[in-house]
Amino acid sequence: MRAIDQRFSAHADDISREQDRLFYAIYALGVIYDRSHDGSNSSQNKELAFKLHCEALRLRVVRNRTFSIVSAQAEFLTCLYYLTMSMFAEAWMAVGSLARSLQAIGLHRFTKVDSPTHFDCEDGKRLFWCAYCLDRYLSAMLGRPNAFQDRDIDADFPTLVSDVEENEVYGLGSAGPCLMTAALAHFKLAKIVGCITTDIYGPSCRDISQRQQLIVALRNRVNDWAEQLPAYLSPHSGGRLPLLPTYARQASVLNLAYWHAILSLYRSYVVLRSPDPSLDATFVSVAQDEALEAAQSIATAVRQIHDSGHYTFGFWFTSYIAFSASLVMIVSTSQLHPNESRYASLDSSIRSCMLFLESVGRINRVTDLYFKVVQNIRNAVRENAPQVNNAIPDSAVDFDWSWFDETFAMNQAQSSSGNARQHVMQDHETSYLGQYNPGFFQSPADMLEAYVISTTT
């Protein structure tokens, strides 16, 4: 910390406070990411990162409120710090502030290139779409409204240009690797994910037939998106292509993002054993198969990440995806007899997700809570298996989910009875979980959002 302070003091004349804040934010993340890939991130590293983060916040407070790309970059890194430390409530608030900053600069609108350099133009576009992507996935995770509204945005996507050779522009379907290919693909998928959360799960979608039409249309958009990917990023490649570590991580992230989008489309249909006559039975059957295929593909992907050692704290969304997939598969197994052929396959996939959550949970408190919740619910399903399998209800509404409420309440009590937190930087690590409120749910399908209820008081 002293060395960093000396570095800034030596250049006090030619480095602005905004740049100082940006450097502190970069170092805060760098300290955490330094050893996070092998789970050996020490408490000293976290302590140093927290001090650097606090200094970045102090510089924001002492400076008059101005809007610039540099200040917005610092805001963005602050969001990433909160997500890395599993401080999701703070991250959501920070994303809102970041969105306002970018809109004040005007990066959400299409403008003619009037920047002095190509780098400045691309820098602004990349920053905006990174923030947009962050907003969409954080909103999907927390079940809260988006900070960016698509109706206000007409900004161009970043150019597929190599950072080494500015004049070398790639096409999205190019076979040759480019570091921006995965990023651009992720930005486009984030727009679809935003439509899923607002159109499928938003308050405006009430009609059953309209909901099915929207799901079909969004599924086609996801298919079109996947077909445009180069082979090394395709979610259907099965990880068979040998890739450099950077491209392997990009492929892993896009693979998870793709299957998460499919899971989000169909997960609410998993709880329907004998659907209501007003529903299209064929559509429900297809939806259930799609959701389970996505969940099992996620289990395979997280197992590969676990085995390859590619996981870092930057994969903050991965644990939630594994958790969501686990719940979908557990719900499905609760409606199957242990002797049925699919039961063993699903149970194996659940164990893969649990192995990943248990491993990451050793270095992340929220992931540890995910693991405990999945473990408790899985045990509860197994204990209730004789009753469930002997008398499967005709509809999800009649299904007895009282054991689920009891399991969650028990887990909350266990997680809150531990030792006091040792540092203020940990005070809100699990705060986004909020207080469990059974009245929040409108149907058993909403149990998939059980652990992303809003928020701290």
Image: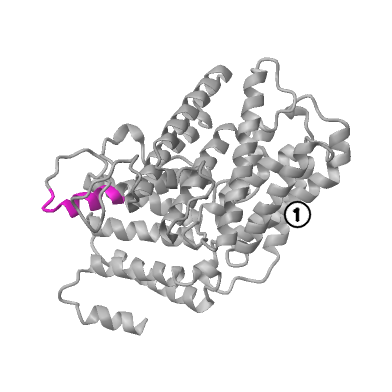
Residue 277 against residue 405 in the figure, above or below: above
Give, as a three-letter code, the residue at label 1.
Answer: Met
Would you say the magenta stretch is mainly helix, strand or loop? helix
Number of residues whose C-alpha sits closer than 10 Å to that of mark 1, classed few (under 14), some (14–19) or many (20 or more): few
- The image quarter containing residue 448 is top right
Q: Is residue 434 left or right of residue 29?
A: right
Q: Which element is circle 1 on?
A: helix
Query: Residue 242 appears at what percent x and percent y?
Result: 47, 55
**In which quadrant of the rendered image does the N terminus lie?**
bottom left
- Which residue matches tag 1? 410
The one nearer the camera, 108 or 258, is 258
Q: Is residue 434 left or right of residue 346?
A: left
Report if residue 313 lies within the magenta region. no
Kindly identify the residue that appears in the image at 36 percent across and 60 percent down: 77
Query: Residue 224 appears at what percent x and percent y?
Result: 42, 31
Q: Is residue 457 visible?
A: no
Q: Is residue 430 left or right of residue 314?
A: right
Report if residue 125 lies within the magenta region. yes
What is the span of residues highlighted in magenta in the rendered image?
A: 115-127
In the displayed image of the protein, which residue is found farthest to the top?
278
Q: Is residue 444 left or right of residue 184?
A: right
Residue 166 against residue 9 in the figure, above or below: above
The one nearer the camera, 423 or 369, is 369
What's the colour scheme? Answer: one colour
- The image quarter containing residue 13 is bottom left
Q: Is residue 176 visible?
A: yes
Query: Residue 451 appears at what percent x and percent y?
Result: 62, 48
Kindly identify the residue that appears in the image at 47 percent across and 27 percent down: 220
Kindly identify the residue that appears in the image at 50 percent across and 59 percent down: 87
Query: Residue 107 appears at what percent x and percent y?
Result: 24, 45
The one nearer the camera, 360 or 368, is 360
